[in-house]
Image (cartoon, grey):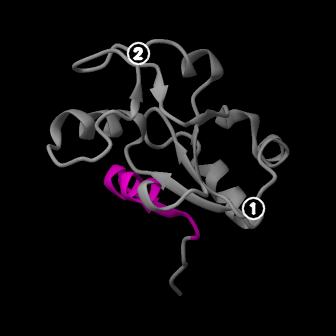
Amino acid sequence: MVQKNTIDFITSVNYCNSISVKNNILLVDLRHDTLFDKTTSGIKYDYQNVKGSVNFFAEKGEQAFTRAFPDKKVTYVLMSQNGTTGLELADALTKKGYRISWLIGGLQRLEWYTINVDNFDCKNILAQ
C-alpha cells in the first residue's frame, strides 16, 4: 500500500512563481522568534528574514498554530532554517485540514537561489 503525503513539497522556484500569481499564500518562518528579526550573516550579504513572512516557532505545536492562523483557505508555506525542523507540525496541520506546503531546503536553500540562480525572479526576497 502506497501512502499519499498531504504536504506539498516545493522548491524556492515553485514558491517564487506561486507568490507572483496567487495572493492567498503565507510564508511561515518556523525559527524561534529571537532569530526571526536577528541579522543573519549570509553568504554574500546580511539579512533578517524573508519579505512578507510571519514568524511562528515550530515547537509551540499545532494547537498554538491553529489559534494563530485559523484560516484554512490560505496556503501556508512552512520554512525552517535547516529544511527539516517542523515537518511533524506540517503533517499534523494537514490532518486538521490545513493546506500546507513545505519549502525544501528552508531558508538556507532560498538564500542560495537568490545568489546563484540568474533567472530567479525573487532575488530581492530576503529582507535586509
Please tell me whether mark 2 sits on a helix, a strand or a loop.
Answer: loop
**Mark 1, residues whose alpha carbon is within 10 Å: few (<14), some, or many (≥20)?**
some
Side (left or right) of 23 relative to 119: right
- Of residues 5 and 128, the one drawn nearer to the viewer in this rendering: 128
The answer to which image quadrant residue 98 occupies is bottom right
Mark 1 or mark 2: whose residue is earlier in sequence: 2
* Amino acid at pointer 2: Thr
Give me the C-alpha separation between circle 1 and circle 2: 31 Å
Give the magenta range: 6-19
Q: Is residue 49 above or below residue 35?
A: below
The answer to which image quadrant residue 97 occupies is bottom right
**Mark 2, residues whose alpha carbon is within 10 Å: few (<14), some, or many (≥20)?**
some
- Of residues 108 and 19, the one drawn nearer to the viewer in this rendering: 19
Side (left or right) of 115 relative to 58: left
Residue 78 location, x and y as percent? 56, 47
Number of disc labels: 2
Q: Are marks 1 and 2 in contact (CB under 8 Å)?
A: no
Side (left or right) of 62 relative to 43: right
Residue at 75% over, 41% down: 61
* Amino acid at pointer 1: Lys
Q: Is residue 99 magenta?
A: no
Residue 100 location, x and y as percent? 60, 59
Q: Which residue is mark 1?
A: 72
Q: Which residue is mark 2?
A: 40
Tag of residue 24: none
Residue 12 location, x and y as percent? 35, 49
Residue 116 location, x and y as percent? 16, 37
- Of residues 22 and 30, the one drawn nearer to the viewer in this rendering: 22
Q: Residue furthest bottom?
A: 1
Please tell me whether mark 1 sits on a helix, a strand or a loop.
Answer: loop
Q: Is residue 16 magenta?
A: yes
Residue at 55% over, 78% down: 3
